[in-house]
Image (tube, rainbow, N blue to C red):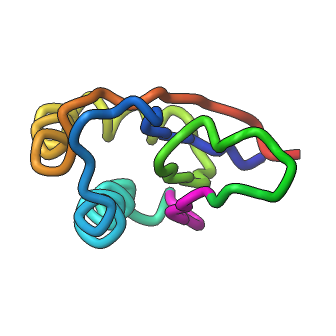
C-alpha cells in the first residue's frame, strides 16, 4: 500500500517563492522522509482554455509506504519543516492525505 501526502498553497497567498519551494523546501522534506518516500513531485498549475482558474499556486506530492513513518518524521522534524515555510511563504498550506489505488 502507498499513501500520498499533498501540500497546496492557495491562490490568495500573499508572498510565495516558487523557486525556493521547488528547489529547497520540497527536496528537504523528501530527504527527511528517507527511504519511506518512494516518489515526490512539485507542480505549478496552468490555466486550461475554457476551464476555471487553478485553485492553488503550487503543490507538492509525497508518495510514502508507511503513514506511521511519515507521522514520525512530522513529529520529530516538524519544527524545522514548519519554520522553513517562512522562507518562501507567509501562508500555511492546505494539507491532504490519500491512499494510492
Numbered marks: total:
0
Nearer the observer, 62 or 52:
52
Residue 43 drawn above or below residue 78: below
Residue 56 located left or right of residue 81: right
Which secondary structure type mostly characterizes the magenta part of the structure?
strand
Residue 17 drawn above or below residue 79: below
Q: Position of residue 39 (x, y in %)?
A: 58, 67
Residue under the image location 12 percent in, 32 percent down: 79
What's drawn in magenta, residue-wise? 37-45
Residue 23 located left or right of residue 36: left
Instruction: Identify the image quadrant of residue 82.
Output: top left
Residue 38 belongs to magenta span: yes
Residue under the image location 67 percent in, 42 percent down: 53
Q: Position of residue 23 (x, y in %)?
A: 29, 72
Instruction: Identify the image quadrant of residue 86.
Output: top left
Q: Position of residue 30 (x, y in %)?
A: 38, 61
Residue 64 drawn above or below residue 27: above
Instruction: Identify the image quadrant of residue 27.
Output: bottom left
Residue under the image location 30 percent in, 27 percent down: 92
Residue 43 belongs to magenta span: yes
Q: Position of residue 9 (x, y in %)?
A: 43, 38
Residue under the image location 33 percent in, 60 percent down: 18
- The residue lying furthest to the front in this view is 50
Q: Which quarter of the image is occupied by the C terminus?
A: top right
Amino acid at each position: 500500500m502507498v499513501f500520498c501526502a499533498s501540500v497546496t498553497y492557495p491562490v490568495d497567498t500573499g508572498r510565495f517563492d516558487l523557486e525556493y519551494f521547488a528547489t529547497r523546501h520540497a527536496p528537504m522534506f523528501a530527504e527527511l522522509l528517507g527511504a519511506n518516500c518512494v516518489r515526490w513531485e512539485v507542480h505549478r498549475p496552468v490555466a486550461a482554455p475554457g476551464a476555471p482558474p487553478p485553485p492553488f499556486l503550487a503543490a507538492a506530492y509525497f508518495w510514502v509506504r508507511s503513514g506511521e513513518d511519515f507521522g514520525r518524521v512530522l513529529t520529530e522534524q516538524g519544527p524545522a519543516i514548519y519554520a522553513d515555510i517562512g522562507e518562501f511563504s507567509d501562508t500555511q498550506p492546505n494539507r491532504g492525505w490519500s491512499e494510492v489505488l
